[in-house]
Image (cartoon, helix red, strand yellow):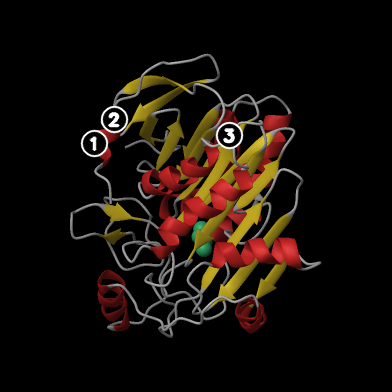
Amino acid sequence: MVNRRKFIHASAFGSLGILFSKMAAGNQVPFTIKGKPVVISTWDAGLEANKAAWEILHKGGRAVDAVEKGVMVTEASQNCCVGLGANPDRDGFVTLDACIMDEFSNCGSVAFLERIKHPVAVARRVMEKTPHVMLVGSGAQQFAVAEGFALEEQKLSTQAQAAYEEWLKNSEYKPPVINIENKNGHGPFAPLKLSNGEWNHDTIGMVAMDAQGNMGGSCTTSGAGFKMRGRIGDSPIIGAGLFVDNEVGACTATGQGEDVIRVAGSHSVVELMRQGLSPEAACKKIIERIVKIKKSKAKDIQVAFLALNKKGQAGAFALHPGFRYAIKNGDKEILVTSKSWFNE
Ligand code: GLY
């Protein structure tokens, strides 16, 4: 895990979209995306994931290839609430959800997938090798194995094992604990505290624009920790956890999946960008829609959207403070703290 403080060094260096964001250190710092290519992704783990995406983008590769390879870094990490080391469901099984979408509106998705290390890569195969968009459960696993993916042994990370054992003491499926760093707990979206004191979160969503100006996106998660067996969140659902429209832009979501699905979150953000809203303004409007629906219960959940438009402007908005996202553009890597509906 990279220390985020190393990356708080935003500087203006170009002509495309100006991004005014509240930095992790708490300052309002102008950051200008230099132009294509650019990749953005959710949470601190996005810094490492963006580096892998950049390997493809800076050589002129496709955005869809970059976003697949990027989030695979996070899926492979045993230090994250994504991938096979993550929080299990209430019965002790890690079940994974992922999706991917390209510049032609091709999309693929897997959900409730067990014992496969890279669900996003299976989603890509669904997109390219089947007439379908989504495969789930044993069918998705059967397809993965037929495609040559290894069936792994489940091995929870030390943190996930400890969190699960703690949860088992009461085995209560409580309302979700807010997925922000000052809310430690053992609820479905409690972030994992790493040995170096940093936090990791439930989902990585990534969107990118390549050197040709084409967009792609991916999203992958283990979902809510200690969820009911069979529960699927927003992350593998095209239009909820991820949406890409190559004419307009792309959006991904993180947080309480049920409430992202209710508003077709990522699709709704992209449609607002189509109407001319900036990425941040579009994300904010959909967060406001969730607040309107949830009323007083909005205080109990975290949801965040992260979007990139065709002009190369990035923006985000969260329900609660604490959501961070990573940007890689040119030789700059930066971690940005999103604005939020609730204040600190
Ligand atoms: N956003 C992840 C989930 O709800 O599963």
Percent x, y for residue 209? Answer: 60, 35
**Residue 273 visible somewhere in the drawing:** yes
Is the residue indicated by label 3 positioned so its CB lies within 8 Å of ligand 1? no
Q: What element carries label 2?
A: loop
Q: Quadrant of residue 212?
A: top right
Q: Are marks 1 and 2 in contact (CB under 8 Å)?
A: yes
Identify the residue position indicated by label 1 in the image.
Answer: 5
Q: Quadrant of residue 23?
A: top left
- Given residues 290 and 74, the one toward you in this image is 74
* Tag 2: amino acid: Ile
Numbered circle sitting on residue 308: 3
Query: Is residue 173 positioned above or below 301 on the image?
Result: below
Q: Residue at x 51, y 67 (%)?
A: 118
- For label 1, the crowd category at 10 Å Cα-Cα, with few meaning under 14, some 14 to 19 and many 20 or more, is few
- For label 2, the crowd category at 10 Å Cα-Cα, with few meaning under 14, some 14 to 19 and many 20 or more, is some
Q: Is mark 3 on a helix, strand or loop?
A: strand
C-alpha distance separating marks 3 and 1? 24 Å
Q: Which residue is drawn at 41% across and 43% down?
A: 51
**Residue 289 visible somewhere in the drawing:** no
* Tag 3: amino acid: Leu
Q: In which quarter of the image is residue 339?
A: top left
Identify the residue position indicated by label 2 in the image.
Answer: 8
Residue placed farthest to the right in the image? 131
C-alpha distance separating marks 3 and 2? 20 Å
Mark 3 or mark 2: name the one nearer the start of the chain: 2
Q: Which residue is drawn at 31% across and 62% down?
A: 79
* Tag 1: amino acid: Arg
